[in-house]
Image (cartoon, grey):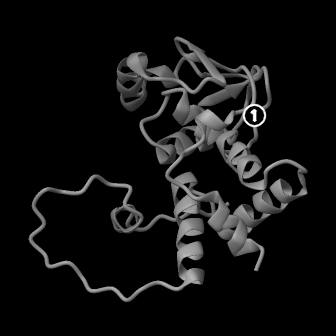
């Protein structure tokens, strides 16, 4: 599956995911007011960028969430949160979602005693996610694991050393609040 490999800083700045620098030598650009469609599109693009998902896969996730009788936006976020690359990131095995995706792609992750190298693999309740013992020697993983001791885990995950477990499905308290899911629903409902 493809993924975006270009400059990420410009997207992080555009979606205001980076902290603002106190000294910005450039003049702020004049931007025209966005249309309602533009606002909805940007919110969708922001969510796709955060989770590293391309359009076709994101649309499929949305259609799966729409079929569920409960809240579509919440179900969409549950699907995105349960992706294996995101779970590896949330457990503190990798510093970023992109690094977690690479760990999964390169076969460093084991789910229920089986090697899984598909980043979009959806974990289930009671799945055990670990890293191979050889993978714990990777300097980035070692550093992240040491810093991750004080990491605040979401309530639906449990971690003990290099072993993580999915206790339950993500709940609303664990979902990002800086994303307006209603705008994404409106975008696809046009």
- Image coordinates of residue 62 in percent, x first then y, are 77, 60
* Residue occupying image coordinates x 68% and y 42%: 83
Label 1 Cα crowd, 10 Å radius (few <14 / some 14-19 / many 20+): many
- Image coordinates of residue 146 in percent, x first then y, are 37, 18
Q: Is residue 8 above or below residue 119?
A: below
* Residue occupying image coordinates x 49% and y 48%: 98
Q: Nearer the viewer, residue 140 or 55?
A: 55
- Image coordinates of residue 32 in percent, x first then y, are 37, 89
Residue 150 lies in what quarter of the image? top left
Q: Is residue 87 above or below residue 17?
A: above
* Residue occupying image coordinates x 38% and y 69%: 14
Q: Is residue 183 above or below residue 70?
A: below
Residue where numbered disc 1 is placed: 123
- Image coordinates of residue 120 in percent, x first then y, are 70, 47
Farthest bottom residue? 32
Q: Is any part of residue 107 visible from this angle?
A: no
Q: Nearer the viewer, residue 182 or 110?
A: 182
* Residue occupying image coordinates x 54% and y 26%: 91
Q: Is any part of residue 6 visible from this angle?
A: yes
Residue 116 lies in what quarter of the image? top right
Side of 28 relative to 66 (left or right): left
Q: How many marks?
A: 1
Tell me the element at label 1.
Answer: loop
Q: Nearer the viewer, residue 71 or 24?
A: 71
Side of 149 relative to 18 (left or right): right
Q: Is residue 44 above or below residue 180?
A: below
Q: Quadrant of the C terminus?
A: bottom right
């Amino acid at each position: 599956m493809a993924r975006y490999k270009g400059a990420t800083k410009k997207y992080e700045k555009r979606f205001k995911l980076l902290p603002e620098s106190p000294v910005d030598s450039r003049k702020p650009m004049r931007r025209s007011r966005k249309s309602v469609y533009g606002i909805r599109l940007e919110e969708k693009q922001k969510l796709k960028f955060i989770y590293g998902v391309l359009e076709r896969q994101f649309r499929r996730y949305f259609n799966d969430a729409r079929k569920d009788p409960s809240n579509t936006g919440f179900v969409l976020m549950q699907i995105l949160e349960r992706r294996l690359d995101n779970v590896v990131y949330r457990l503190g095995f990798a510093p970023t979602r992109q690094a977690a995706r690479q760990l999964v792609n390169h076969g460093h992750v084991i789910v229920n005693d089986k090697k899984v190298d598909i980043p979009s693999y959806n974990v289930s309740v009671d799945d055990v996610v670990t890293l191979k013992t050889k993978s714990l020697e990777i300097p980035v993983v070692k550093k992240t694991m040491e810093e991750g001791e004080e990491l605040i885990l979401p309530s639906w995950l449990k971690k003990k050393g290099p072993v993580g477990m999915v206790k339950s499905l993500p709940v609303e308290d664990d979902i990002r609040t800086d994303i307006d899911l209603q705008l994404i629903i409106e975008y696809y409902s046009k």
